Image (cartoon, rainbow, N blue to C red):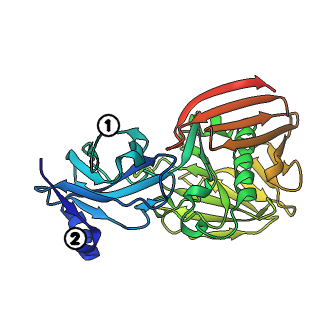
Amino acid sequence: MKFAAVTFLLVPLSAIAAAKKEGQVLVTIELAKTSGASRESSLSVSFPKDCGLCQLDKDPAYAKQNKRVAVLAVLLPRSTAVPVHVAIPPSTVRRVLLEGQELPFTQDDNGIGFTVPPQAVNRVNSGEFQTHIFWPGIDLRFEHGDPERRDGKYQSGAWPAVQLKSAHTLEFAQLLAIRMLGLDSQVVDRNIGSLDLMGFDTDFPHGHEDYPPHMHMILWWPTPTGAGSLIAHYYITPQGLLDHTEVIPLRTVGLVATRIERGVSYTDTDYTGERVYSHTITDKGWLQIAEVNGGSCLISPLGHGFDSGSAVECAGFPRRTIQVDDDIEKGKITVLNDGMRKTIYTYDLDSGQLLGTEPNVVR
């Protein structure tokens, strides 16, 4: 099959916008680079000559490069398999991934070739560096901060190491509090969605700024579109404490963003408006979570900030402690419980996808 090279400069943005209405989907492809690759590897993309709906998109929200990966953004005909050729030094590329799915590829003197499987909807999440860990009623999305992938508003300036480690610790501390409060069982039994715990992206995936540093606890409503909720953002100071909360509605009607200062509680509801739990950032920058008809948990730092670890104190339960370490070179998240037992999560070094769990390792 013959290919024709396509460059973004030949395709005006208006043409791309119009073409998207004619049966195209936007697909992002991650090329995982070898260790010796440069940050900006020279590349060009070619499509079959008879593919009139095939185009390259260089919107920096989707297309990007760094020392770890090159992310291609391509507009392709909906539900159609398309062979693609990338002119790039062949030794530069180790793997080709579509949202973590491995795509077979071939090498030639000019680069690599692969086929994008038929896609019925946009697939824009390639290049994310996150690990999703699931329990009934809970999705913990662990964002790996990698200085080599920094982009968007995190592209320059001081690297937010303290805030990242604080978010990592707080995610697992919230997980523990949720379980002791029984909120996980409640959302499952009432079929009102899932509790999502998230940190913040530093690599600007699909245009997600996620700035300034913060973390989330969300009751993700099971709406007809599969999305919609009140998204609580807990902003993290450079000292590793919580500053304030901003609740930003997503795909809801008649609700606006609300800023909540320290010492003021905010109650999250299900999609019918029934109260489920409240969250409060204390005057000290700590976090309190309470079940509206039951107990409450206070999450405090072990040291000055949450980067040192978290203590979780829930009514009726012994005090618990959590410390978290993320090794992005080995692909390991280590969660130390009560200073004695470790749970180790291993993940794919390119996509972040969870590979395995090793619980209850005695220190």
Q: Badge 1: how crowded within 10 Å, few (<14), some, or many (20+)?
A: few
Rendered position, 356 above or below 155: above
Q: Secondary structure at mark 1?
A: loop
Q: Amino acid at mark 2?
A: Ala
Residue 243: x and y, percent?
A: 77, 66
Q: Badge 2: how crowded within 10 Å, few (<14), some, or many (20+)?
A: few
Residue 220: x and y, percent?
A: 54, 49
Residue 255: x and y, percent?
A: 55, 68
The residue tagged 2 is 18
Q: What residue is drawn where x is 73% and y is 49%?
A: 170
Residue pushed farthest front? 109
Mark nearer the N terminus (2 vs 1): 2
Rendered position, 25 above or below 138: below
Rendered position, 107 above or below 303: above
Q: What residue is drawn where x is 82% and y is 64%?
A: 263
Q: Amino acid at mark 1?
A: Pro
- The answer to whether residue 284 is seen in the rendering is yes
Residue 253: x and y, percent?
A: 48, 65
Q: What residue is drawn where x is 69% and y is 57%?
A: 267
The residue tagged 1 is 104
